[in-house]
Amino acid sequence: MQIICCVCHKTKRYNGWAKQAVRSGVQLSHGYCPHCYKQMIERVENFFVMSDCRKSA
């Protein structure tokens, strides 16, 4: 099974994440690479901060 980032499509390798073609016939599992995960968490946190600001106004 090969893990692929659902945002940037980098694949997880034994030494990190890299842009690489996915071999045919390999099962994929989707997740987030560390870079995309950090960006997604920041977006989620900002969403909730902005939601709290709108409620209190």
Image (cartoon, grey):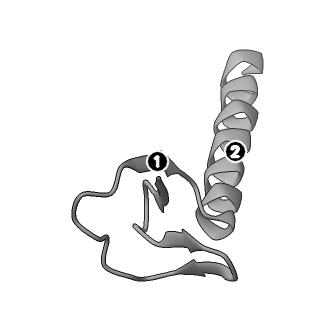
Is residue 20 rendered to the left or right of residue 32? left
Residue at the left extreme of this rendering: 24
The answer to which quarter of the image holds residue 48 is: top right
The answer to which quarter of the image holds residue 9 is: bottom left
Badge 1 crowding class, 10 Å Cα cut-off, few under 14, some 14 to 19, many 20 or more, is: few
Badge 2 crowding class, 10 Å Cα cut-off, few under 14, some 14 to 19, many 20 or more, is: few
Q: Amino acid at mark 2?
A: Asn
Q: Which residue does the image show at 46% across and 72% down from the upper left?
A: 10
Is residue 47 rendered to the left or right of residue 25? right
Is residue 26 rendered to the left or right of residue 1? left
Quarter occupied by the C terminus: top right
Task: Determine the secondary structure under disc 2.
Answer: helix
Residue 45 % position (x, y): 74, 41
Q: How many marks?
A: 2
State which mark lies toward you, 2 or 1: 1
Q: Which residue is mark 1?
A: 30
From the viewer's side, name the closer residue of 45 and 1.
Answer: 1
Task: Determine the secondary structure under disc 1.
Answer: strand
* Label of residue 44 in the image: none
Marks 2/1: CA–CA distance: 24 Å
Q: Which residue does the image show at 75% across and 25% down from the upper left?
A: 52
Residue at the front extreme of this rendering: 25
Residue 27 % position (x, y): 36, 49
Residue 14 % position (x, y): 67, 76
Q: Which residue does the image show at 31% across and 79% down from the upper left?
A: 21
From the viewer's side, name the closer residue of 42 and 14.
Answer: 14
User: Is the residue 35 above or below the residue 41 in the image?
Assistant: below
Q: Which residue is mark 2?
A: 46
User: Is the residue 47 above or below the residue 12 in the image?
Assistant: above
